[in-house]
Image (tube, rainbow, N blue to C red):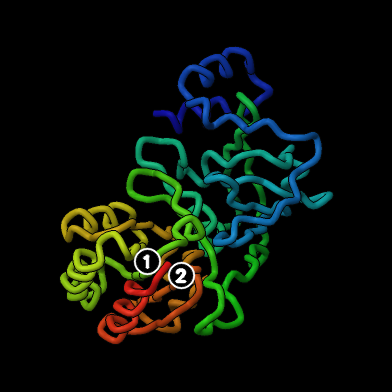
Amino acid sequence: MLTSLIMKAGSLNRRPVAWLAILAAIVPPALAAPPAPSVPSREAPHPSAPVVRVSGMTLEIRSGRVVVTDIAKGSPAERAGVKTLDIVLVVNERSLIDLDPISPQQVLALMQYEQTLRTRLVLGRGTGTLSVDLAQAPGETWTAPVAPAELRIGVEAPVFSGSDLQGREVSLKDLRGRPVLLDFWSSTCPPCLKAVVPIRRIAEQYAGVLSIVGVSLDDDRKAFEAFVYNQHLPGTQIFDGGGWGGPIARLYGVAREGIPHYVLLDAQGRLAATGDLRDLEADITRLAAAPR
């Protein structure tokens, strides 16, 4: 219902006052664009997010939202009235603000992989919205690479952040001070199901001295949630939002390794070991016993 109301209210040229009053009542205040200077922010993009360019505009994840950060002069986006710092609320009928929203990571994945001749967006701007229908040239959409050149033992692990099952923001950098085990998995992966018992055992054995962060490569968020609940997965579980092409999976080159895939970090956030869970247990024991 909310999506349909937004789509009807999308045109800022027809009865703006009445529609904006309705939207102000039903759209949570958190969706309003944050106070910003008159010029767009040039801070670095979210470390785990690909930068997507479509119809002449650049989209990035900023503070859990998909934000327009740049617009090419003369582009379809500029001609449609899109402005920097506009926030994407709906993309091709998929909403980020309904009761069952898609994630910001999914939005960028859709932009990258769902090649269409037109892209329909509802954008948030302050307390108002703008509905646009943008032409998209085939092959125009691109993303900036997010995978590091190499992952070597002893180097600082690529940092990322994501939302857990409760919607709380989890940052890898905030977990420093104890070893961290990254677990890349999918609900459709039979070996991942077999690995559930050992990962639960390790979580119990090293409770309080080891942090576990699971990263799901599922395409379907409901499948991700069901697997976490039904299998009682330990630690923090994150939905990457783009399957094998998700930003965190790409950051760690998981497509080259297959799943389940494990990456062990020391208390300072450096790569300590990667590979099969059985091969990492000795390293986990060593790091858990190390003074901090």
**Residue at x 40% of width, y 42% of height:** 101
User: Quadrant of the image for the N terminus?
Assistant: top left
**Residue at x 40% of width, y 82% of height:** 274
Name the kind of residue labelled 1 in the image: Leu
Gap in angstroms between the C-alphas marked 2 and 1: 7 Å
- Say above or below: 41 vs 16: below
User: Quadrant of the image for the C terminus?
Assistant: bottom left
**Which corner quadrant of the image does residue 211 belong to?**
bottom left
- Say above or below: 11 vs 169: above
Residue with the mark numbered 1: 217
Position of residue 57 in the picture relative to residue 186 (left or right): right
**Residue at x 29% of width, y 78% of height:** 285
Label 2: which secondary element: helix
Residue 120 percent location from the top left of the image: 57, 44
Tell me whether the residue at label 2 lies in contact with that at label 1, contact meaning CB atoms closer than 8 angstroms: yes
Residue 243 percent location from the top left of the image: 41, 66
Residue 148 percent location from the top left of the image: 59, 76
| Observer-nearest of 82 and 4 | 82
- Say above or below: 180 vs 127: below
Residue 96 percent location from the top left of the image: 47, 41
Residue with the mark numbered 2: 249
| Observer-nearest of 79 and 225 | 225
Outermost residue on the front side: it is 291
Name the kind of residue labelled 2 in the image: Ala
Outermost residue on the bottom side: it is 279
